[in-house]
Image (cartoon, rainbow, N blue to C red):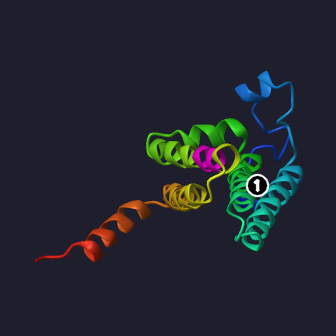
Amino acid sequence: MWKLKQLIPGGDEEEREESFLEDESDGLCSLSYTQRMYAFAACLLAGLVCMFLSMIVFVKPIKFAILFTFGNLLAVGSTAFLIGPAQQINMMFDSARVYATAIYLGCVVIALICALWIHSKILTIIAIICEICALIWYSLSYIPFARRMISELMIRFCDTEL
């Protein structure tokens, strides 16, 4: 737990350096370690509850898309409480995962457009499947060599010689 406190900003007020974002936001991001952990847990739990509730309304794709997408955004955004919003954005748009982030956010927008504006159940389901795949690929970008390993496995499984 001690190592986790060192990684998460906002632990000890005396030891903490002021970051650019904290200077600009007039202390809005100056949460204590305990407050960050509670906010992370609450946001992650709310996201997981939304994703679970979306499974209940699965037969209604538009409601499913709204709940599932909102739950996804809450769960992904919950880590901003741990590492801070500026660090979260920097990590999301790092050169190693900028394409995964762009595709994930694009799929989120497309799913919401299909559900709220177009009202097409088939397009909404397709967009949600793409969103799930993009979320998995985005999540794998945080595990060293995971995307390379999955890519090589897919090439091996799908490569056929005729």
Taking the spot 73% from the left edge, 65% from the top edge, the residue there is 51
Left or right of 89, for residue 134? left
Position of residue 107 relative to residue 145, above or below, is above
Instruction: Give the quarter of the image for residue 15.
Output: top right
Position of residue 22 relative to residue 68, above or below, is above
Task: Pinpoint residue 159: horizontal percent, then vertical percent.
Answer: 22, 72
Left or right of 145, for residue 29? right
Q: Which residues are magenta?
A: 108-114
Magenta portion: prevailing SS class: helix
Residue farthest to the left, as pictured = 162
Residue farthest to the top, as pictured = 24
Position of residue 11 relative to residue 38, above or below, is above
Question: Which residue matches tag 1?
Answer: 5
Does the magenta portion include 112? Answer: yes
Task: Pinpoint residue 40: horizontal percent, then vertical percent.
Answer: 80, 55
Does the magenta portion include 109? Answer: yes
Which sits in the foreground, 78 or 82?
A: 78
Taking the spot 58% from the left edge, 61% from the top edge, the residue there is 125
Task: Pinpoint residue 26: horizontal percent, then vertical percent.
Answer: 86, 24
Disc 1 secondary structure class: helix
Position of residue 39 relative to residue 58, above or below, is above
